Image (spheres, rainbow, N blue to C red):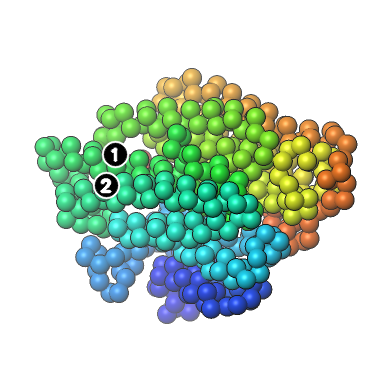
Amino acid sequence: MNAVLPHLPALQVVVPLIGAILAAFLRRGNFAFTLTLAVSAILPFISGALLWQVLTGGPISYAMGGWAPPIGIEYRVDLLSAFVLMLISVVGVVIIPFAHRSVASEIDASKQAWFYCMYLLCLTGLLGITITGDAFNAFVFLEVSSLATYVLIAMGRDRRALLAAFQYLIIGTIGATLYVIGVGFLYLLTGSLNMVDVAQRLAAVEPDQMRTVITALAFITVGVSLKLALFPLHVWLPNAYAYAPSWVTVFLAATATKVAIYLLVRYLFSIFGVAVNLQALPVGEIIIALSLAAMFIASFVAVFETNLKRMLAYSSVAQIGYITLGIGLANQAGLTGGLVHIVNHAFMKAALFLALGAIVYRIGSARLGDLAGIGRKMPLTMAAFAVAGLGLIGTPGTSGFISKWFLAIGALDRGWWILVPAIMASSMIAFVYVGRVLEMAYLREPSAETARASDPPLSMLLPMLVLAAATVYFGFDTEWTAGIAGKASQALVQGLAR
């Protein structure tokens, strides 16, 4: 065991990568699922051990191939990256039991092994983005996860899934190109790709080189913003979520955009923030303006959606706005609110999409008009949906309230009190679109579509109940969410150039 511990950073990526390779050689979906389940069960132990090491001993630096950084590729785990690694791993293991029946009902048997192969590749990429300390290596992992995601979306049974995947491919390629151009500017300026080394060298750049730094900042920010679906760069997301297989939507909503947000935070605070006084540039103001637009416009669109997958997709765009609002505030309380909402929204939105996936499994539809009275026929499923929906609104006693509380404090600390009623008003719009679903589910007579519906099997039911319970639990016990996010935010904000 002691011989394994030093290599945990590498194992965090290698384990799912090997799993993906093995899944590609399996012919039967059941075998591939069993392998994927085993891999998913291992990953939280690795990320948990890394988080514990960081909490007790500080950041971890792992030199790949024995080549010391900054020459070689470094895997670097600090509190922020350990926090996100743990989120991805935990979400993966919680939701994977749901996949067995859901994937079997939506994916042809001949393609199921490839489906799990692509999922594990996507997981490898997301974990790699989070753990790597090399800017170009992050691009490689970004492309690994993106290419796998395009395939997963295209496997949807609706023919429009192919169009959604192609749209995401085009936009994702543009985002990746902008990102790598920005990295190229950084390399030309610093001669390094190691993130820690780049940050140190940027801190010593001459004033006449600052224009190049700002150009790199612009390219990387826009490129990553396309990946995280920051309004108005979100156009790929609604169709991708709506037409992807139900379980793919759950996974992407809970992890993919969150990792892209992590990458943005890493660059803004840990790399550019040490060289550029971001508060002297309109970066924060632009991010806040776009965040507010997302919170209101995307929420208004969600109110009028009749396809619940699209409704929750636009809700995700709005909720991403809350996270980026905290990033734009760039103080400890605001950034804590943004980081903790990465976790809280992942749990809430995963529970909502799981509940919707269970409904699709039972009645074959995700349209609002087909859900009349389904709360009486699928009581546990809709109870999970209701609890997660209340968290989405930010009801006291749920984790969503904690996120918005810190965001409000961050706004007041910056003297921008007007953001507080804006946060409350946008939450009321969420109340409207969540309320529409609950009204249809509980206050209408069961329709012909829902008359024979019932709660799904335990393997599908348990993950959504666990995530709904987490939405309530982390509304009271915030030590492992807001506590860790607060420590990470403090370290990030303290490192900013003033």
Crowdedness near tag 1: few (<14), some (14–19) or many (≥20) residues, C-alpha within 10 Å? some
Residue at the image point whose x is 24% and y is 57% from the top:
193
Q: Position of residue 285 (x, y in %)?
A: 37, 27
Q: Position of residue 71 (x, y in %)?
A: 21, 65
Q: Quarter-wise, where is residue 81 in the image?
A: bottom left
Q: Residue furthest front?
A: 159
Q: Nearer the viewer, residue 323 or 479?
A: 323
Q: Position of residue 65 (x, y in %)?
A: 30, 74
Reply above or below: 431 against 45: above
Residue placed under numbered mark 2 in the picture: 182
Task: Assess whether mark 1 and mark 2 are in contact (beta carbons under 8 angstroms).
Answer: yes
- Disc 2 element: helix
Measured Cα–Cα span from mark 2 to mark 1: 8 Å
Q: Is 113 left, or right, of 79 in this rendering? A: right
Camera sees residue 440:
yes
Residue placed under numbered mark 1 in the picture: 218
Q: Position of residue 337 (x, y in %)?
A: 50, 38
Residue at the image point whose x is 40% and y is 56% from the top:
142
